[in-house]
Image (tube, coloured by chain):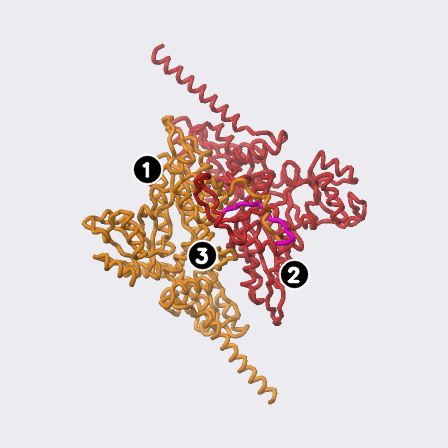
Chain colours: A orange, B red
Amino acid sequence: MNTYNKFHWKRILNRVISRLNFCVRKMSKGITPQSKDYSAWYTEVVTKASLADYGPVKGTMVVRPYGFSLWDNIKEIFDKMIKDTGHVNAYFPLFIPKSFLAKEAEHVEGFAKECAVVTHTRLKADDEHGIVVDPESKLEEEVIVRPTSETVIWAMYKKWIQSYRDLPLLINQWANVVRWEMRTRLFLRTTEFLWQEGHTAHATAKEAEEEARLILELYRQLAEDYLAMPVHTGMKSESEKFAGAECTYCIESLMGDKRALQAGTSHNLGQNFAKVFDVTFQTRDNKEKLVYATSWGVSTRLVGGVIMTHGDDKGLRLPPKIAPYQIVIVPIFRDEESQQAVKNYLDPILADLRNAGIRIHEDWRKETPGFKFNEWEMKGVPLRLEVGPKDVEKGKAVLVRRDNGEKQFVEKGEISKCVPGLLDEIQKSLFEQARTFREKNTHTVSSYDEFKKVIANQGGFIRCGWDGTGETEMAIKEETKATVRVIPFDENPKDLSCIYSGKPAKHEVIFAKAY
Amino acid sequence: MNTYNKFHWKRILNRVISRLNFCVRKMSKGITPQSKDYSAWYTEVVTKASLADYGPVKGTMVVRPYGFSLWDNIKEIFDKMIKDTGHVNAYFPLFIPKSFLAKEAEHVEGFAKECAVVTHTRLKADDEHGIVVDPESKLEEEVIVRPTSETVIWAMYKKWIQSYRDLPLLINQWANVVRWEMRTRLFLRTTEFLWQEGHTAHATAKEAEEEARLILELYRQLAEDYLAMPVHTGMKSESEKFAGAECTYCIESLMGDKRALQAGTSHNLGQNFAKVFDVTFQTRDNKEKLVYATSWGVSTRLVGGVIMTHGDDKGLRLPPKIAPYQIVIVPIFRDEESQQAVKNYLDPILADLRNAGIRIHEDWRKETPGFKFNEWEMKGVPLRLEVGPKDVEKGKAVLVRRDNGEKQFVEKGEISKCVPGLLDEIQKSLFEQARTFREKNTHTVSSYDEFKKVIANQGGFIRCGWDGTGETEMAIKEETKATVRVIPFDENPKDLSCIYSGKPAKHEVIFAKAY
C-alpha cells in the first residue's frame, strides 16, 4: 500500500470512528421517554442536563453550576419582590436547642421524625477503629439542625420586640434546612435543601392575615409570570397545614405526569409562637399584647416543578426569564479559517444581544453541531442560533425555538431585534401549554366511583365537593392516595355535595395524587 | 389652678420628661471607649449598631438585617469578581460522611477537634423526660457538619473529571460552615459562620499556583478597594498553613487594637486531595494524571475586620462602597406642617440621589434629631443630610461626614452633585487613615528584647528576619503570643538575621499577636 492510499484509508477510518463516536454519544444522550417511565425520565434529565447529583450522605443533593444558576435566577427575582414590599434579609443559626423545638407541641410533632441531631463536637484517633467520635465531647443538650427556623427566630424576636414601634418586623432568610427523609428525589425531596423562609411579626391579626395573603400572591406571580407554571391558590385543609400554623395558604400546580406539586406555602401562625416564646409588645395605649406571626417559604423544589411542568422527551425546556442562558450560539465550522469567518460575522450580533441584556452562551467546542444541538436541547436553552459559512455568505442565520422546535432563517440585521420578542413569545407559549395541559387534566366527577377511576387511570386534578371533615379526607386518601391539594380561593361550594359522603359540601376542593 | 395654668405646667412637664428621656437614651447609646476596653467596645458596637446577636446555641450568631446587608454588599462585590474571572457557583451538601473527612490525614487532624457530629435522625416523646433523642434512629456512620468542603467536593470531582477537556473546573459556593469553637466572638470566631469557598481543579501545577495567586489578588482588591482595609499579601508559614495545603497565601491586616486579623486565605493544595480521592484525568496525549487543586475562602469575619479597622468611639464607620445606606436623611420638624414642607423640599433632591444610584435611608421617626444623629453615627452611615425649616427657607442643607465629622452647608441644587464625590473622598480617607495607622504601628526591631517589649507594650506589626524554622516560631509564640502572620511577597531577607536565633534570615516576615 503506498503512502497516498495509507493516508486515504486512515482518513476514511477516522471519519467512520468519529461518526460512530457521535452516534454513541447521541444514543447516550437519549433519555427514557416520559410515557415509558416518568420517574426515570425525571432523574435522567436532572443528571444529563447537569442540574444536580446525589451527595455522599444519603439523600443529600449537590446542585451543579447549571442547576444552581437556574435557582439563583429564581432567587434573585423573588428577593427583589420581597424587598420591594418592605422585607429585609437576615441570617439565623443552623442549630436549634432541642428544648426550643419541643416548645410548640404541634410543631415538634411535625418535625420530630426527621431531625438531624448533633450530639458530639469532636473526633479523635483510635488505634483500633481509626477516627472515632470522642465520647467525652458529648453535648449536655442535643442540638437540632434546623428543619425550619420558627423556634430560633421567635426566641430572638422575644429580645427584639418591645413596643408597637418595633412592628411589623418583616424578615426573610435564604438558607439551607434539613429534614431527614427516607425516600428522596433530587430537588423534590432531599435531606438538605435550599430555601427562603420569611418570618414576620405584626401588631394585629388582620395585618398577619394580609401579610400571609400578600406573600401567597407574590408566590403566584413568581410561579406564573417567571416559572411559567400555572398554579391554583388557596388554603390547605387541617390535615395538610403547617405544624404550628392557624392556616396555611399554598400554590399548587400540576406536573407532566398528572401529579400535583405543592410549590410554595404561606402560613398565618396566629399567636402560637408568640405564646410559647412569650413575645409581647406594648400597644399605643400602653397595653401588653401577644404578637401575631406569619411564616412562608419556597425552596429548590421549584426547580423540580420547572422540570416537570415544561420538560419533554428531549430534556428540559426552560422559561426564558429564569434560564441561565436565554440563547445558545452554535457556530458551525470545519477549520480555523471558517471558524474565524463565523466569529467575525457573529461578533457584532452578539454585542447587540449582550447590550440588550440577553444571557448568551457561545459553544465553540470542537464537537459536531448535532452533538451540541442535543446537549443544549437537553439543557433547555430557549433559543438556539446556528451560524455556518453558508449563512455568513448569505448574511443570514438560523434561529430555533426550544418550546416548539420552530426553525427560521433570519437576516443578519434582524437577529438582535427579533430575539427579545421571541423570548417573550416562548415565555408565554410555555405558560399556555402548561395551562392547556392542566385544563385538559382537570376533571369534574359526579360520583365517588368515577372519582376513583379518574385517580387510578387518568390522574390530574379533580374539582369536587367535600364535606370538610378529616374522616372523609382520610378515607379518600387511604383508598386512592389522593389528597385535598387546595381549597381554592375561587371555590363555589353552593349546591355541591361531598363526593364521598354525599352530605352538603363545605368546600369545593381540588383533589390529586401529589409529590 | 386655672385651665391655662394646668395646660402650661403639663407642657413644661412633658418637655422635661422628653429631655430626660433623651438624656437616658443618649447615655444608653454611649459605648465604652476603645482606649478603655477594646473588646467591650467591639461587642457594644456589634450589638448597638444592630449588626449581630448571639443565637441560643453557644457560639452561634444571628446576623441582623443591618449586618446582613453589609455582608450581602461584600458578597455581591466578590461574586462579580469571581464570575468575571470565569468562576461559577454551585452548592454542595452540608453533611460529610465521617470517613471522608478522615481520608486526608493533615486535614482531619486540623478539624477533628471542632466538629459538629450528627449521630441520630429522630426525636420522640418520652413520658419521663419529655422530648428525647430516639436511640433507634442512630446512624450507622456518623455524619459531620462541614467545617470546610474539600472532601465532599473532591468526592464529586472524582465523578465529574475524566479528561483534560473537563479542566479547569472553577467552582465556588456561598455557604455556612461549622467549627465548634470554645471561645467565640461575633463575626470573628463563631461556631457557625457564612463564607464563600472556592474549589478549583487544574491540569498543571502551574495553573493551580496561578489560580491561588489570582484569588489572593482579588482578595486584596476586595479588602483594599472596597472595605478600605489595607492588607499585606504573602505566604503563611508551615505551622499556620491550611490543613491539607501545600502552601497557603493570605491577606493580613491590622486592627484598631494593634492586633492582626487574617482576613482571607487562598491555598494551593497540590495533588493532596486528588490523591486521596483518586481524581485523575486523561491528558491530551492520552496519559493518566492526578489533578491539581486550589481552595480559598473569605467569611463573615470580614465584617469584624471592617468594624475594627474603621470604628471609633462613636461606633461604626463604614466605607461607602459597602455601606447598607450611603447617606441617611435626617429631616428636622416640629409639626405636620413643617414636616410636609421639609418633605416637599427633599423629594426632588432624593429623586436625584436615587437616580445617581446612591443608597439612601430616610429617617422620619418622631425621635429627636440628636437621638437620630447618635444612632446613625453608631451605625456608621458615611454621610448625613440634615434639613430643617430654616434650611428650606435658605435653600440649603447640612451635610455631615462620618469619617471626620466635617459639616458643610450646601446649596439645594448642589447636593446631588456633590454627594458622589464626597462618598469617594470618604472611601479614600478611610483607607488612608487605616494605612497611616498601620504604618505608625509597624515596627522594626534590632534585638529580641526589643521585640518582646514592642509586642508586650505597643502591639502592632513587627517586620524582621526569621530563620524559617518551626522551633523559632514556636519559641517566640510561647514567650510573646506573637506569630508569623505572613511572609510578605515584598520581603527582602538579604542581610537580615533571625530576630530570635541570630542565624541568617530565611525570610523577612511580619510578626504580630492575632485574632
Q: Is residue B18 above or below residue A88?
A: above
Please say whether residue B32 is one of the residues in the magenta stretch: no
Q: Is residue B45 above or below residue A113?
A: above
Amino acid type assigned to the residue bearing label 2 in the image: Lys
Amino acid type assigned to the residue bearing label 1 in the image: Lys
Numbered mark located on residue B325 in the image: none
Extreme residue in the top direction: B1
Numbered mark located on residue A70 in the image: 3
- Categorize mark 2 by other alpha carbons within 10 Å: few (<14), some (14-19), many (20+): few
Specify which label sits upstream in the sequence, 3 or 1: 3
Of residue B360 and residue A48, the one placed in the foreground of this image is A48
Task: Report the Cα–Cα distance between label 1 and label 2.
Answer: 63 Å
Residue B48 at x, y = what percent? 52, 33
Residue under circle 1? A206
Residue A53 at x, y = what percent? 49, 60
The magenta region covers A116-129
Q: Tell me the quarter of the image containing the C terminus of chain B.
A: top right
Name the element at disc 3: helix
Chain at tag 1 = A
Is there one chain holding both mark 3 and mark 2? no
Name the element at disc 2: helix
Q: Is residue A340 visible?
A: yes
Residue A84 at x, y = what percent? 40, 44
